[in-house]
Amino acid sequence: MVIQTLTSETYPPDVDDAERKRLIEVIKDWAVANGLTVRPPPSLLAAEADPDGVLATNVPVTLFPSPFPRVCFQQAKAVQKAYNELYAKNLSLGLFRSDYMVHKDTTDSSSIPIVKQVEFNTIASSFGGLSSQTCSLHRFLSDTEYPYLKQPGGHARFDLPSNHSIKGLAGGMKAAFEAYGKSDLGLETCVIFLVQGGERNVFDQRHLEYALRSSTSPRIPVFRLPYSEILQRTRISDTPKRQLLYRLPSNPDKEFEVAVIYMRSGYDPSDYPDASAWEARYHLERSGAIKCPTVLTQLAGAKKVQQVLATPKLDPNSPSELSRFVPEDTQAWKDLWATFTNIYPMDDSEPGLEARKLALDPEQCKRYVLKPQREGGGNNCYKTSIPPFLKNLPATHWKSYILMELITPPPVSNIILRNGKLEQGGVICELGVYGTCVWDQGTGNVLHNEEAGYLLRTKGDQSEEGGVAAGFGCMDSCNLV
């Protein structure tokens, strides 16, 4: 069955060589001038060519904002607060991102499109800084460049929603900082960004840092700490509150009390190369600092938890797994449930054994993606690659995966600028909605709960992975239709 496209025959506009050259020049300069940048990838520049890390390049980005159904955009934003509360743990900070793709029932021509959840991110939910800048770029182009294109499609009116992801995510960190309170030790309190060594996506993080530092009431010192230096730079006070104390490497006499730890590392196996790395994580967990996230919240973002929450009721008289956390007679439950797609375990339970049959069937497998409990992109197995992958994997390891039904979005066309070159054709868009939450499990109080802007990532329709940092996708913004 033919799926109705979201783009007309004139979108994106048919720009000629001179217009392409002009747009490339404008986008490259605007991106560098406004921090829509990353460190150059190895495919563009060998590491030894820039040993001091002084170079930057524009992030891969679309030339035009991609059409996105207004009803789906509104649905995804409206459900974010319910997701925030669903995943909140202890007195901790959650900077979450719930990722969706548009789904339309191809068997019913009158059905409206809805969003279905791809995954829920509870750690290092990236690109909030660059997403806001991408929206600003497309707004700038719609004012200064698109009106002068020769092809009529460029003169169309664009409906570009505002995006406050930088302000929203920084606001969540500020709320946690204030919830921590003043130091009992008489020290100045601070926020730590826990980062990976050689981080290419540093400017995305810097936008959040600068927004947080701009706060004057209260003043919020922010420091970047490589994960490998946790034990070297911090200690835990010998007090009942176990305050985490941090010394500046540039001035070891100056000590701060850490109010909030924002983790942009600690999600990948490579972050834990030895026993000392695990000791460092335990060191942070046992401290009194507010963690973003705690180990519990990080584990709550595993694909297995997503699969369990999406499990339908096997017995009409028994509660669903989701209703253990959100009452089934509430609007929040209905909104959350509407975003779930079919996800199956790969264990030896009855549903798991049925899922194994689907995954191994050479025809049925084309409708699914096999996902491990990993973050960061590039780890999934798709369609006909699933049977041979499983046959080469010990059956005892299968239960660590989940099988998800593929979401098939309506076709969209666009042009991507990547490493100075243009790629034009069909694309697939994935919407991420950010949320911030500070929750006190002891009292049951939600101290802060806000939707915090959005991210639109786009990839070529022949690509199965979508991570921008992993080199698969690009930054985009929504043109609501």
Image: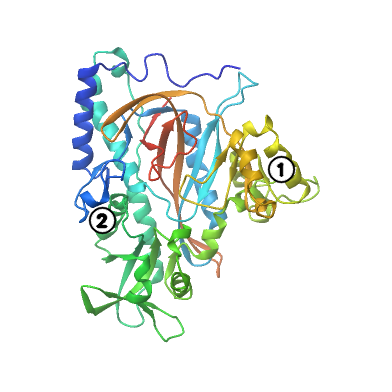
Mark 2 residue element: helix
The residue nearer to you, when weighing 372 against 11, is: 372
- In the image, residue 288 lies at what x, y percent? 44, 75
Can residue 130 be seen in this snapshot? yes
Q: Quadrant of the C terminus?
A: top left
Nearer to us: label 2 or label 1: 1
Which mark identifies residue 356? 1
Position of 398 with respect to 32 (left or right) is right
The residue nearer to you, when weighing 460 against 7, is: 460
Mark 1 residue element: helix
Taking 98 as reference, is 264 above or below it?
below
Residue at horizontal 23%, vertical 18%? 17
Q: Amino acid at mark 2?
A: Tyr
Q: Residues within 10 Å of mark 2 (few under 14, many from 20)?
A: few
Residue at horizontal 54%, vertical 41%? 118
In the rendered picture of this protein, how many numbered marks are placed on residues? 2
- In the image, residue 208 lies at what x, y percent? 31, 54
Q: Residue furthest bottom?
A: 238
User: Quick check: marks 2 and 1 in contact, CB under 8 Å?
Assistant: no
- In the image, residue 466 lies at what x, y percent? 45, 39
Q: Earlier in the sequence, mark 2 or mark 1?
A: 2
Q: Quadrant of the N terminus?
A: top right
Q: Amino acid at mark 1?
A: Arg
Which mark identifies residue 168? none
Tell me how far mark 2 sits from mark 1, CA to CA. 48 Å
Which residue is identified by label 2? Answer: 210
